Image: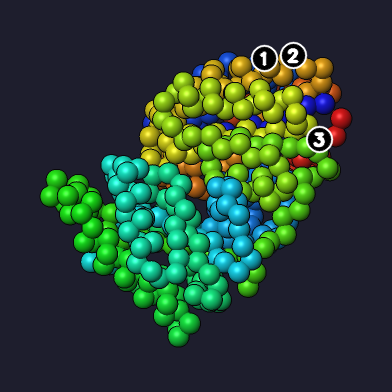
Amino acid sequence: MKRVLVILDGAADLPIRGFNGRTPLEIARMPLMDRLARMGRQGVLAEGDDPALPFEVRHLWSLLGRRPGAWQGGTGYLEALGLGLETRPDHWYLSAGLVALNDRVLETAEVPGLSEEEADELFSGLDRLGLGFSHHRQSGSRAVLEVPKSVWTWPSVCDLRHPPESMQGKPVLPFLPEGRDAAPIRTAWDGCCKLLSMEDVNLVRADLGETPANGVWWWGGPTGESQWGDGGACPLGLRGGLISDSMLLCGVARVCGMDARHVSAVKGQKSYYSDRLAEFAQLLGKQELIVVHAGRPAECGLRGALDEKVWALEGLDQWLLRPLVEMLMGVDAWRLVVSAGSMVSVEQRTYRSGPIPFLMAGSGVRADLNRTWNERTAGTGIPGPISGANLWRRLVEA
């Protein structure tokens, strides 16, 4: 049997004022999901409750049956695994990002209009400072920092845990580690920011009235002295694969021994869907379990773009789910779970805690009485909220 989990990350939402209290899932026209609702069962999933992991990772971590607190490596190490780096036990791995500072206050965590070439030049300049670290580029303004444990020591490195999005509008210095062991980190940060403020890239951006990337921030440090967490193998020994544009989720997949396929986070509709479908077609012939992650609903929700979130849901229904289900129809036995992944309030522009709606359809699944899928209908389905491990058993057990 082929088992497929599709995560429409951030699809769940709170009722929207001005739309008769409806949510984006209720507003969006999703005929394929309506079809699956008529042939399947739905319910709500208790969200992952591991505070050491960001919202986008907690859901998959919970679904794979991982216990809270099992992972101590931090998000930086997961991103290193997602990048495919050959990690070393005597090195730390942290998330890194170029930011905009104003008198040591973090003005913006994502520098607008910063090109790949500009980011490459700025990160290369930081690595030439000779402070013992190096940055491995991701995309946009992000990278993974690798630094020997002899240069930055434990426990100071554990204090580098706050993502820049949580610090916007706040002074940066209180978020840096303190104490004697923290001196190399604080010295490195101060030197990096001084260098960035003098780089030609930023001087030109300032002359053009553009926001300079005049700061760097590191986060996602370990929660324990070792950065080698207990991930474990893919549950029940299944051969598994994951498709995502998130380095974090690719890292989770590799921790669990899955085949991680990273796709570009491009904005163009055609390649956004076609890249995932092409990888899915390859994995369908090789793997027993396939996880497909699409983070566009969360991206739109965090920007407060209601129309775009609704369009994203409609596009995923038409251009991703419909052809994906058509491919599944060509195999003898299959079971599909579609999950909202997380709750992102488009009005509040933030992740929110709450139950996550899901829908299960396919071989051996008895249909309930629902005819559409959203937060309200999911609440009338399987009594819950159910745990990730419970939903996992329902997906994998024939």
* Left or right: 377 as drawn, with respect to 143: right
Marks 1 and 2, how far apart at CA: 7 Å
Residue drawn at point x = 21 percent, y = 61 percent: 198
- What residue does disc 1 label? 326
Q: Is residue 360 visible?
A: no
SS class, disc 2:
loop
Q: x, y (%) of residue 391?
A: 75, 39
Marks 3 and 2, how far apart at CA: 19 Å
Q: x, y (%) of residue 251?
A: 61, 48
Q: x, y (%) of residue 188?
A: 37, 71
Relative to the observer, which residue lies in front, 217 or 115?
A: 115
* Left or right: 341 as drawn, with respect to 270: right
Q: Which numbered disc flags the more N-terminal residue, 1 or 3?
A: 1
Marks 1 and 3, how far apart at CA: 20 Å
* Left or right: 279 as drawn, with respect to 38: left
SS class, disc 1:
helix
- Quarter in which the N terminus is drawn: top right
Crowd tier of the residue under label 2, counting other residues whose Cα lies within 10 Å: few below 14, some 14–19, many 20 or above: few
> Contact, CB < 8 Å: mark 1 with mark 2?
yes
> Contact, CB < 8 Å: mark 3 with mark 2?
no
Above or below for 217 versus 369: below
Q: Is residue 233 visible?
A: yes
- Give the number of the disc on residue 198: none
- Quarter in which the C terminus is drawn: top right
- What residue does disc 2 label? 330
Q: Amino acid at mark 1?
A: Glu
Q: Residue furthest left?
A: 207
- What residue does disc 3 label? 396
Above or below for 179 versus 391: below
Residue drawn at point x = 27 percent, y = 64 percent: 195
* Left or right: 212 as drawn, with respect to 278: left
Crowd tier of the residue under label 1, counting other residues whose Cα lies within 10 Å: few below 14, some 14–19, many 20 or above: few
